[in-house]
Image: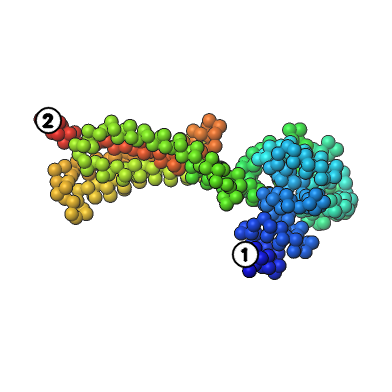
Amino acid sequence: MSEPQAGAMELGRLSLDDLRDAWRVLDGEERLEGFRMLGVLDAEEFFTQLATNDQRALLDTFSATERRHWVRMLAPDDAADLLQELDEQRRAEYLALFDEPVRREVAALLAYAEDDAGGLMSPRFARVRPDQTVDEAILYLRRQAFDRLELIYYGYVLDREQRLLGVVSFRDLFRARGSASVRDVMKTDVITVPEEMDQETVGRVFAEHDLVALPVLDGAGRMKGIVTVDDIVDVVQEEATEDIQKIGGTAALDAPYLEVGLLGMVKKRLGWLTILFFAQMLTVVVMKHFQVRIETVSLLSLFIPLIISSGGNSGSQASTLVIRAMSLGEVQLSDWKRVFFHELAAGLCLGLVLGLIGFARVIGLWPGDAAEYALFSWQLGVTILFSVIGVVLWGTLIGSMLPLVLRRLGLDPASASAPLVATLCDVTGILIYFLTATFWLAHVFEQAATP
């Protein structure tokens, strides 16, 4: 039996949970076959929970009638996410599949940038008026519940101009007297976000206040929608993935790793590799400048990997810690002095520990090499000690300050990738190493130069 046939037979026995587990390893034809074998309710649940890329791929395999049915299953914000990834022509084709009210909602969301609060929000939220009684508000909310609201735990109190006045929970409504007005029950201390706020900042607001939903307001204070915590979970994962990819020295991928083609993968990675390759050429220039020193004391070349890796590793550590702290809101631009002195102390301590280990290695605490270093082992050990302290300290400061400098310039701090920091530390580390050697081994070089 061929593999496709075997796969098809297995799909016939898949439950909803099994299809979720197997989805990642199935090809397009098997995914479609498995999806068609689900019951109506299971299929609706499965489709609405799929990632946007998978929804789009599945819709592309449907007939026009099926596509119309399934695309209408999506909430307006999810539909907008789907359409954001299409070109203008296909976006118009998909918009035509919605009825007029939903089409207006989706089109309004598409007007926002994808990574703004307005692009994340859902326009379907529960609304009440301040002059309604509690009984009237409950009945009003019950009618709205049939409109597939994004969230049914809170009602947002709006005036006639749609400005947000307060929020009332369903629990407070049910506990209040039926004749009381909504104005008397609502809470006016509401945390909101502007429609143009970046999604990463929205995520931090959720984390700081432990919220379920955030109202999104325009410049006039009118409520445009809500961002819910399930949306922000996806945002946090997306932002973290993008930062990690950039920290690794590559451009952020536009699709899951295994779905990126060879040409796309090369394009994403070649840019940084080319920049780093040219930067590493400076290492050759520095080493050529000190070639005489290397020829005079050949032992110096043995410790080059030790020196440059110490600086690169310390710089990569510092940049990763600071980038993550910035993404979590723990470090702001105004904290640069605290970060500087914090890393200055850490770099000195780390450099001293590593330098002493290197010093001990040179002066013969490891047996078998004493004769090799006999003539100038002490001077060489001190050279290694101060070189390691210098490169680790420099790498730590470069790694911690570069993300802050990039943020100050309006660039993504994650661009201060570990490979970039390591490359900068390689070049400067060799320079520090040979300048230190020139000072501590001056008499050795002078004796070699004397006829």
Label of residue 450 in the image: 2
User: In the image, 340: left or right of 260?
Assistant: left
Number of numbered markers:
2
The x and y percentages for residue 252 are: 56, 43
Q: Residues within 10 Å of mark 2 (few under 14, many from 20)?
A: few
Type of the residue with mark 1: Glu
Label of residue 303 in the image: none
* 294 or 57, nearer to the observer: 57
The x and y percentages for residue 392 are: 35, 42
- Tell me what residue is drawn at x 10 percent, y 30 percent: 451
Position of residue 222 relative to residue 138, above or below, is above
Query: Could one spot residue 62 in this view of the protein?
Result: yes
User: In the image, 111: left or right of 366?
Assistant: right
Residue 164: name its quadrant: top right
In terms of secondary structure, where does tag 1 sit?
helix
Label of residue 3 in the image: 1
- Tell me what residue is drawn at x 29 percent, y 42 percent: 304
Residue 287: name its quadrant: top left
- Tell me what residue is drawn at x 81 percent, y 40 percent: 104
Type of the residue with mark 2: Thr
- Tell me what residue is drawn at x 70 percent, y 41 percent: 86
Q: Residues within 10 Å of mark 1 (few under 14, many from 20)?
A: few
Q: Quadrant of the N terminus?
A: bottom right
The x and y percentages for residue 16 are: 70, 64
